[in-house]
Image (cartoon, helix red, strand yellow):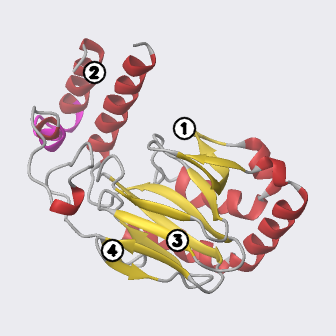
Amino acid sequence: MTPDTEDVFARIKEEHGRDSLARVEKMLEPGRGERHPLQRNARWILPGISPTPWHDPYGHDEIVAFARELESQHGAIKAELADAWARRRADFHDYQHYLRSQQDWQALHLYRDGAQVPQAARIMPTASRVLREYAVDTGLICPLLECHFSTLLPGAVVPAHCDLWNFTINLHLAVDIPPGCLITVAGESRSWVEGRCLLFDYSFEHEARNDGDRPRTCLLADLWHPETTLPERMALTTVVREVRRLLDGA
């Protein structure tokens, strides 16, 4: 850790207790630590997080209100998406995953770099309002990551991969789902049900495909894992931002 990071950790422990960051400090020790085999390519595994690939989107008190509100607004969100796809196609772009960029995977970001995207809020007002009220203002969304409309064009395949860590969790609202679309997490495949949410731990190996004849779109939100604590979230935000700063300056 850098001196700046150590100072932040010290202040957090002074406020929340000396053991409040024990799991984060354990995660940062040399070596990859214990992990499920299907998390083998994740960079960081926070100890003590349940190794559960699929989650019930209505099973966590912190997340259920956001999931329910997204579902209740599905009709308006789908209509705004159709209008944006038809008239504002240039606002969508090739999705830049940390591993790759795909032309057949298009994205429109509502939240990025720790803030909502003003232009997207004008295009997608319903989803942007729900995101602000139920995830941004409540601190549920992880400021290190993003929320975006994810569109897989017909024939698109997102190859199997692990994301970087297990201390965030991925919520999907199924906005526009043609037949022939699947997502597989830790070897278990499921279909999106239009208007409903899915929730999974994307540190586990996962993949997605659109074998349908029209685009498949979900609204994806990167949320703090409900088994993380407030002091851990503060510390993890500091660590990842410092790592990114050092890499950008390398």
* Residue 49: percent from left, percent from top: 20, 58
The residue identified by callout 3 is: 209
Q: Which residue lies furthest to the front in this view?
A: 155
Quarter of the image for residue 203 reads: bottom left
Helix, strand or loop at mark 4: strand
Which stretch is magenta? 15-24
The residue identified by callout 2 is: 5
The residue identified by callout 1 is: 114
Pick the residue in front: 119 or 106.
106
Question: Would you say the residues marked 1 and 3 are in contact, meaning their CB atoms lie under 8 Å apart?
Answer: no
Q: Distance between the residues labelled 1 and 4?
A: 26 Å
**Mark before the other along the chain sequence, 2 or 3:** 2
Q: Nearer the viewer, mark 1 or mark 4?
A: 4
Give, as a three-letter code, the residue at label 3. Answer: Arg
* Residue 130: percent from left, percent from top: 65, 63
Pick the residue in front: 62 or 87.
87
